[in-house]
Image (cartoon, rainbow, N blue to C red):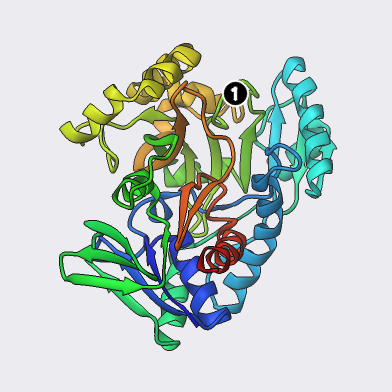
Amino acid sequence: MAHVTVIGGGVVGLAVARELRVTRGHQVTVLEKENGWARHQTGHNSGVLHAGLYYRPGSEKARMCVAGNASMAAYAREHGVPVSVCGKLVVATDEAEADRLRELAGRAEANGVPARAIGPDEAREHEPAVRCVAALRVESTGVVDFTGVCAAMVEELARHGADLRLGAEALAIRRGPGRVEVATGNGVVRSDALVNCAGLHSDRVADLAGLRPGARILPFRGEYYELRPERRHLVTGLVYPVPDPALPFLGVHLTRMLDGSVHAGPNAVLALRREGYRWRDASARDLAEVVRFPGTWGLARRHVRTGIAETLRSLSRARFAADLARLVPDIGPEDLVRAPAGVRAQAVLADGRLVDDFLIELVPRQVHVLNAPSPAATSALEIATRVADHVSSVLN
């Protein structure tokens, strides 16, 4: 069996390590630069267990999300991690959205997602406060404690003798005869193969390894509010808008979490730091990279109106509330309180196009996961299987 080093201690990295160690018997070392697991994308996401509704039929996203929805829910139940498959509503608020909703229903059918079109009366049976002209009921959407999933994976890995290292940032990577060496602040790790699951820093880790990936990571901060406790009754499950196919994000939506709180969001604004969870979190290095990258300006030209709208909504609770009120009219600005934000690692090409699917690059003895945005958490166990297969191929 081989010795594999995995860089990144979020849900994807830990799922890959688990697949390699627990399922396939390889020796595994996991390097995480923070002093705890799941500190960034995994620990700041919405907790939604996605159904696979939105993604292009035949894409990796679609296939892995549908399979991941089932495997992640099963893993959570097996390991005592809180999960609720409660279903969601996608609601059309006018006839133009109703036309797009019908297209979305066709995509759900093509992807094998259990969903059905319903009218406004039935929609209100699920969500009494919703206003719509039509809706799509998606049965397999849910919520899960992804941080708890990571804790369960860490416990499994420790029980099976994996080498788990916190506070171990990868500083340099060198490929030698039959091995890969990763230098950290606490020494050098030598192994037969390397897997890069570094999320927000995946392109930088690839740079350390001598790759020049065509896509670079741009960090988008997703900002959330939550409903005041006395207004939580307005949402019983998950309520989503009909997405605009011309835009890269789904739009603000409402999610009842496992603890009964109701989160609203996220919007999407370019963060001023790779781990920039607030406007005041800025990094000169990160900003310089963003400015120098031609894809930033191509993306801005493609989505200038959306960027302005997202920024204005970031700065105005009233605007945020107005978008939510299209779904649930009784929500007003006074009902919202700020909640912690997340940062999404989005791979962007040099011409400004977003990388729409999972992106994995292979070189001898190395596998680099360079784009794993939502629904990566839902799909983590399926991604892990694919990556472990790639490890076998790069070792041969």
Quick one: 352 or 364, which is closer to the camera? Answer: 364
Displayed quadrant of residue 192: bottom left
Judged left or right of residue 250, residue 301 is left
Tell me the residue at 23%/57% (across/down): 172
- In the rendered image, residue 138, in percent from the top left (x then y), is placed at 74, 46
Which residue of the protein is positioned furthest toward the front in this rendering?
177
Tell me the residue at 78%/45% (across/down): 111
Residue type at the position of mark 1:
Arg
- In the rendered image, residue 100, in percent from the top left (x then y), is placed at 75, 23
Q: Helix, strand, or loop for circle 1?
A: loop
Image vertical order of residue 43 relative to residue 159, above or below: above
Image vertical order of residue 298 relative to residue 325, above or below: above
User: Is residue 213 at least partly visible in the picture?
Assistant: yes
Image vertical order of residue 283 relative to residue 9, above or below: above
Displayed quadrant of residue 9: bottom left
Quick one: 335 or 210, which is closer to the camera? Answer: 210
Tell me the residue at 26%/30% (across/down): 289
Judged left or right of residue 99, residue 152 is left
Tell me the residue at 71%/37% (across/down): 56
- Decide: few, some or many residues near mark 1? Use Cα within 10 Å; few <14, some 14-19, many ≥20: some
Displayed quadrant of residue 89: top right
- In the rendered image, residue 366, in percent from the top left (x then y), is placed at 44, 59
Residue position marked by numbered label 1 in the rendering: 326
User: Is residue 282 at least partly visible in the picture?
Assistant: no
Quick one: 87 or 69, which is closer to the camera? Answer: 69
Judged left or right of residue 96, residue 129 is left
